[in-house]
Amino acid sequence: MKRFIIPSLIVIVLLAVGCTSTPDAEQDAAPVESRSGADGGGRIATVTAGGVDSRGLPPELTDSRSILSKRSIYFDYDRFDIKPEYRDLVAAHAKFLTENRQFRMLIQGNTDERGSREYNLALGQKRADAVKKQLVLLGAREEQVESVSLGEEKPKNPGQDEAAWAENRRGDLLYSGEF
């Protein structure tokens, strides 16, 4: 009986000691852009450890009403320049990364299935690098952003028509916890 009581007491004491420290909210807080309020302004709010999802992402990155929840940039056929309609999206992610230096991003460049495997890998890398370059020019740190090519290996739409191919010509933006 003593063999079970002593180890049980040790476990209870260790659990009690481990649970007594409470993290300081300011220590674990990360400033993020708040989209709430009447003015919708770019105010900075503090997100504490309780204000993140299971992947460690704050609500601004997952709330469908936030521009930051948009994570794909689409490209024209055989092109790797960022279209004007995606510049605000890239700028919003750059601002988030600038204000939240602890976050990292992986940009996955994708292509449709047309073209050789080698060509598609190179084009996917050019697309990812174009997004990374724009993020860095807008203030994100080089070490916060990594760009890789998946080529045609991760299609969003498996179809065999122009609409499907258009969905597959993209750069996907993933934050730490999503890759």
Image (cartoon, rainbow, N blue to C red):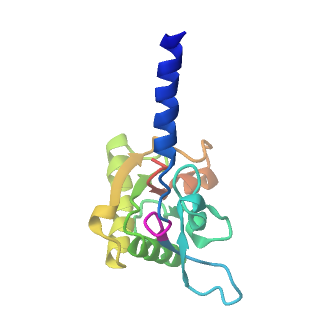
Q: Which residue lies furthest to the front in this view?
A: 2
Compared across the picture, whether 84 is left or right of 129 comes to right
Magenta stretch: includes residue 165: no
**Residue range highlighted in magenta:** 25-30
Q: Which residue lies furthest to the left in this view?
A: 142
Magenta stretch: includes residue 29: yes
Q: What's the residue at 57%, 47% (across, down)?
A: 156
Q: What's the residue at 55%, 84% (across, down)?
A: 43
Q: Which of 106 and 6 is in front in this view?
A: 6
Q: Residue furthest right?
A: 38
Residue 49 lies, in percent from the top left, at 53, 59
Residue 48 location, quadrant = bottom right
Residue 85 lies, in percent from the top left, at 55, 76
Q: What's the residue at 67%, 65% (across, down)?
A: 64
Magenta highlight: main SS: loop
Q: Is residue 8 above or below residue 12?
A: above
Q: Which of 133 and 125 is in front in this view?
A: 133
Residue 155 lies, in percent from the top left, at 53, 45
Which part of the image, by quadrant, shows the N terminus?
top right
Q: Is residue 146 above or below residue 137?
A: above
Q: Which residue lies furthest to the bottom in this view?
A: 39
Residue 162 lies, in percent from the top left, at 60, 54
Q: Across the whole image, how many numbered discs are drawn on residues?
A: 0
